[in-house]
Image (spheres, grey):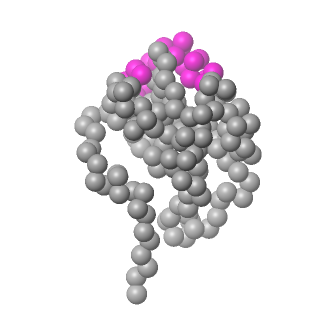
Amino acid sequence: MQDILYAPWRDEYVTNDKIEGCVFCHISTHEMDDTKLHVLYRDEHCFMVMNRYPYTPGHFMIIPHMHTDKLESLDSEVWLHMADLAQKSVKLLKEGLGSHGVNIGMNLGKAGGAGIAEHIHMHIVPRWERDTNFITSVANTRVYSTDFEKIYKKIKTLIPQFI
């Protein structure tokens, strides 16, 4: 007998039109679709967008508008701005969302583990004590404890207060 795991929230992923080219450049240039694309914030240097396949609820990314796969070629002003947004994001997640900790990371290049290697991005991942369990290890399944849209709306309402 085979167990079946239903994941209706992924229906959009398999049925929607696929974005051609760089997904991050598409988000960068389609400001009118910010709600549909789950953009939390944008300015002249970068934008913040929810990760559609998060490690934990509230996982989002800070992404420069400039298309590059080389951190070393990113303008220092943009890099410092991303760092400033990361610092403010940690405060938002701890004070606004109640996370106990935060992971911040960048996977540079395919060999470095980047799922979208052609455009650098910084992951901001809220963490809670006891938010890990065995199911990820033994069943190759991630349990997401809250509705994606609900957490997106919650973080979006916190942006003016923290960013």
Please give the name of the residue rendered at 71% of the width and 32% of the height, measured from the top-left corner: 91
> Residue 65 lies in what quarter of the image?
top left
Residue 93 spot, x, y in % from top left: 67, 38
> Residue 163 lies in what quarter of the image?
top right
For the N terminus, give its image quadrant. Answer: bottom left
Residue in front for this viewpoint, 56 or 138: 56
Q: Considering the whole magenta stretch, tell me its main secondary structure.
A: helix
Note whether 93 is above or below 10 in the view shown.
above
Q: Start and end of the magenta stretch?
A: 65-85
10 magenta-colored? no
Residue 115 spot, x, y in % from top left: 41, 44
Note whether 130 is above or below 34 in the view shown.
below
Residue in front for this viewpoint, 102 or 99: 99
Relative to 42, 18 lies left or right: left
Note whether 89 is above or below 8 in the view shown.
above
Residue 59 spot, x, y in % from top left: 56, 43
> How many numbered markers are drawn?
0
Looking at this rendering, what residue extends furthest in the bottom direction?
Answer: 1
Mark yes or no: residue 81 visible: yes
Please give the name of the residue rendered at 34% of the width and 52% of the height, measured from the top-left corner: 12
Mark yes or no: residue 25 visible: no
Please give the name of the residue rendered at 54% of the width and 19% of the height, measured from the top-left corner: 79
> Residue 20 lies in what quarter of the image?
top left
Note whether 148 is above or below 137 in the view shown.
above
Relative to 53, 55 lies left or right: right
Please give the name of the residue rendered at 27% of the width and 44% of the height, measured from the top-left corner: 18
